[in-house]
Amino acid sequence: MIQFLSHIISGLSLGSIYAIIALGYSMVYGIAKMLNFAHGDVIMIGAYVSFSATQYFGMHPIASVVISVIMCTILGIAIEGFAYKPLRKATSLAVLITAIGMSYLLQNLALLIWGANPKSFTSVVGLGTLSLFGGEMHITSETIVTVLANIIIMIALTTFINKTKMGKAMRAVSEDKGAAELMGINVNLTISMTFAIGSALAAIAGVLLCSSYPSLMPTTGSMPGIKAFTAAVFGGIGSIPGALIGGLLLGLIEILGKAYVSDQLGDALVFAVLIIVLLVRPAGLLGKKVHEKV
């Protein structure tokens, strides 16, 4: 029973990271109606910036996180401005190819700057371990901070979307860009702000991911980014609650699958469950069917 509970906690921790990353995918798709496949590589850049700040410049771990968030926010705005904004009226295929190209560009830039050798990532939390049930179960401080960060981010983002002027503008652009522009909303600024928020969240997720799983440092932008995209689709891409539910469920499925089914088939099980869900609900768990006029 204690071992099962330990797996549940690990699954919620991993799922919280997937949920934070999935928010970036969902926000961009929900507002700009595009899939930003370079988002996973922004996670990688965020982790490497934090790593460089602590290892090369001797910064405090918290300061390194702040620097990482600032750098990734600027990077997100730059990506949107230089790569996606000129394609605002282009076909979805052109935007998709550009997103894939941007992903490869970021990967190769990271290789040039930091090299391909594995790095030893120092946790930005490092508050020790909580022991429960007479020392039979241990919960790391990284796990606690990750789950709390996920809850805080979800509450803050939901409040921002529903209560602020910019959040209302994002909802308006999501519904109808043309109508929003006629009502005086700056569509380009709104989309740029969406990329900025998504990229800032990617930086936080990258740092938390590498703090909890240091072995993922060299490949932060690859499989975790793909799984987070899967979580966004799972929960219903474009939905913030869907990103939360999809991320948590994906983390639980992955951890429990590796523990009780097969360590080698854990990743395959995640995608198998996604296929089953999409066969039953093509729009995802909380997604809405959109009827397009032809």
Image (cartoon, rainbow, N blue to C red):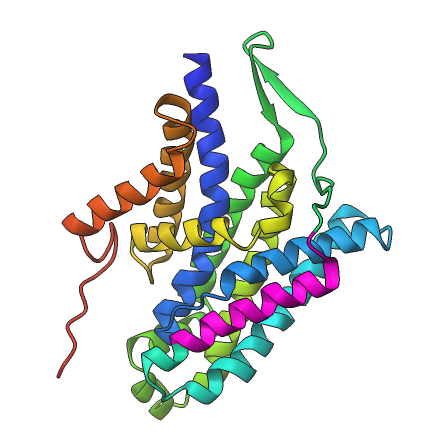
Q: Residue shown at 42%/32% (left/top)?
A: 264
Report the residue that reaches farthest toward the bottom.
182
Q: Is residue 110 shown left or right of residue 13?
A: right
| Front position in the image: 48 or 21 | 48
Q: Is residue 29 shown left or right of residue 214?
A: left
The residue segment tinted magenta is 96-116
Q: Quadrant of residue 255?
A: top left
Magenta segment, prevailing SS (helix, strand or loop): helix
- Residue 58 in view of the camera: yes
Image quarter hosting the C terminus: bottom left
Q: Looking at the picture, how far across and down is residue 141, in whole percent?
A: 64, 31
> Is residue 97 in the magenta section?
yes
Q: Residue shown at 57%/33% (left/top)?
A: 143
Position above or below: 289 against 17: below
Q: Is residue 231 shown left or right of residue 52?
A: left
Q: Looking at the picture, how far across and down is residue 275, in whole percent?
A: 24, 48
Position above or below: 33 against 111: below
Position above or below: 63 against 167: above
Q: Is residue 221 shown left or right of residue 158?
A: right
Position above or below: 165 against 240: below
Q: Quadrant of residue 213?
A: top right
Q: Looking at the picture, how far across and down is residue 85, in whole percent?
A: 48, 85
Report the residue that reaches farthest toward the top.
134
- Residue 169 in view of the camera: no
